């Protein structure tokens, strides 16, 4: 395997020599050399860097990869027919796609707009592509407000997806204001119960 990767015995020997400290081979260095570093996508910090719950991050990761099992995808997979793919959040006025439920749907947009009001966003959009671009380039820092906004995006996507599932599988409906309050509750719970920098708590109390 090493010969295939590095071309010949000399190159392999040179690589192994560079991975030694003194006369000891550092396996971690060999591993790093063998595993090509993957290019980090622009929105990686949006998903993984912050005070995020793993289940929220995972769903956001699926959304970023357009892998949520939305009805348009289920239709393309042959699981639903074309007359079954209307959005349940806005009572079937639009087709359910990733971009629609996050956050072009009038139901989702109400929640997202309430969140943006609460967090005093300077910039606004309900268009997924623009939101992700904004987060990737303007909200990737380590400041408490940036982390707070990353947390709220992941919770919002999760809560809206959960509401969508509740409507489809349990015939239960809630209003945008209730979901907005739930998102705030999750945020406050996380910030109060975790060892989070005091600035974050001060910011939350000032909102
Ligand atoms: Zn909708």
Image (tube, rainbow, N blue to C red):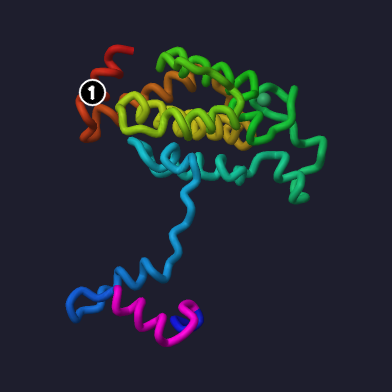
| Quadrant assignment for the C terminus | top left
Q: Which of the two residues, 165 or 16, is positioned nearer the viewer here?
A: 16
> Quarter for ligand 1?
top right
Relative to 69, is 134 above or below?
Answer: above
Looking at the rendered structure, the secondary structure element under dot 1 is helix
Q: Position of residue 15 (x, y in %)?
A: 36, 76
Is 185 on the left or on the right of 196, as rendered? right
Q: Which of the two residues, 52 or 162, is positioned nearer the viewer here?
A: 52
Mark 1 crowdedness (10 Å alpha carbons): few <14, some 14-19, many ≥20: few
Q: Residue furthest left?
A: 22
Find residue 10 and report its image quarter. Answer: bottom left
Residue in the picture at 45% in, 15% down: 122
The rendered magenta stretch, by its main secondary structure, is classed as helix
Residue in the picture at 42% in, 29% down: 139
Relative to 11, is 144 above or below?
Answer: above
The magenta span reads: 5-18
> What residue is disc 1 on?
199
Give the number of marks. Answer: 1
Q: Position of residue 79 (x, y in %)?
A: 74, 48
Q: Which of the two residues, 145 or 24, is positioned nearer the viewer here?
A: 24
Residue 17 included in the magenta stretch of the image: yes
Residue in the picture at 49% in, 41% down: 42
Q: Residue furthest bottom?
A: 9
Residue in the picture at 17% in, 77% down: 22
Residue 144 included in the magenta stretch of the image: no
């Amino acid at each position: 395997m090493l010969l295939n990767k590095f071309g010949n015995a000399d190159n392999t020997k040179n690589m192994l020599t560079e991975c030694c400290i003194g006369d000891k081979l550092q396996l971690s260095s060999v591993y790093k050399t063998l595993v090509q570093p993957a290019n980090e996508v622009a929105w990686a910090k949006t998903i993984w860097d912050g005070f995020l719950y793993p289940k929220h991050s995972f769903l956001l990761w699926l959304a970023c990869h357009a892998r949520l099992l939305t009805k348009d995808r289920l239709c393309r997979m042959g699981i639903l027919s074309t007359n079954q793919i209307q959005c349940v959040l806005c009572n079937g006025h639009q087709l359910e796609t990733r971009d629609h439920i996050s956050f072009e749907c009038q139901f989702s947009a109400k929640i997202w707009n309430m969140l943006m009001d609460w967090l005093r966003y300077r910039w606004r959009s309900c268009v997924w592509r623009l939101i992700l671009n904004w987060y990737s380039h303007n909200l990737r820092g380590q400041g408490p407000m940036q982390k707070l906004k990353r947390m709220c995006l992941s919770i919002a996507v999760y809560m809206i997806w959960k509401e969508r599932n509740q409507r489809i599988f349990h015939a239960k409906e809630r209003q945008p204001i209730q979901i907005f309050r739930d998102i705030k509750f999750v945020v406050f719970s996380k910030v109060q119960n975790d060892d989070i920098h005091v600035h974050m708590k001060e910011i939350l109390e000032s909102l």
